[in-house]
Image: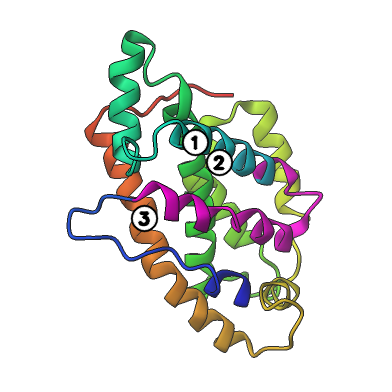
Amino acid sequence: MALLMDHQFRQLPADKQVETRPFLEACSYLPYFIDCLGSTIFAPIKAEITGNLTKIKAVYDTNPGKYKTLQQILEGEKDMHGSQWPKVGATLALMWLKRALRFIQVFLQSLADGERDETNPNLLRINVTKAYEASLMHYHGWFLQKIFKAIMYTAPYKTEFLKSLSKGREVKDEECLEKIRKFLINFSATVDAIYDVYSKMHAELEYKV
């Protein structure tokens, strides 16, 4: 669990603005989290996160003062790209990144809530399936849905996953789950805040890939 707790997301200010730099820094460790689910099998999600982080950072680096928050990036690109927005730039990259973050959020929350297959309680299939259906499935066409359905059946056992999160150390499941709950406080608030910005700015796109 040290993997997540060592790289906590910041507590949001009262206006719920997400600062870009600390957000990118915290997200940069999430690909290692995906490795805990299976570096090969979950490679598409890992690549999606890494690629979108790179695109957002490239825009931020052009003017860190102007793009101090994620909302300022969206507002700046809306002015810059006109009718092409939100189909371009960091706005599009963040749209897909937040969906991957929602996948992680729902997956971890499902684990923390104790949801499991009572006949096979050490399997993560129920948790991974719930996360996929709540985050990415709506935006995937038939082919990608088939691929992800196959991926769900290759998820590691819960005990293996929790051990990987703890960097190989033996830990009690409940101790690890309690740390996941603490991690989720700021992480969930951040993900929800990003979704709220997209909703308020009408920046969400519904196309499938």
Q: Nearer the viewer, residue 133 or 40?
A: 40
Identify the residue at image location x=56%, y=69%. 4
* Residue 44 among those drawn in magenta: yes
Q: Is residue 187 left or right of residue 108?
A: left
The residue identified by callout 1 is 56
Q: Is residue 48 above or below residue 22?
A: above
- Dot 1 amino acid type: Ile
- Give percent across and percent down for residue 13: 23, 60
Q: Quadrant of the image for the N terminus? A: bottom right
Q: Nearer the viewer, residue 83 or 99?
A: 83
Q: Is residue 140 left or right of residue 11?
A: right
Q: Residues within 10 Å of mark 3 (few under 14, many from 20)?
A: many
Indicate which disc, 1 or 3, sits on the residue closer to the N terminus.
1
Check if mark 1's residue and mark 3's residue have beta carbons within 8 Å. Answer: no
Q: Which mark is residue 190?
A: 3
Q: Residues within 10 Å of mark 2 (few under 14, many from 20)?
A: many
The segment highlighted magenta reads 19-45
Q: Nearer the viewer, mark 3 or mark 2?
A: 2
SS for dot 1? helix
- Dot 3 amino acid type: Thr
Q: CA distance from mark 1 to mark 2?
A: 5 Å
Q: CA distance from mark 1 to mark 3?
A: 16 Å
Q: Is residue 191 left or right of residue 32?
A: left
Indicate which disc, 3 or 2, sits on the residue closer to the N terminus.
2
SS for dot 3? helix
Q: Which mark is residue 53?
A: 2
- Dot 2 amino acid type: Leu
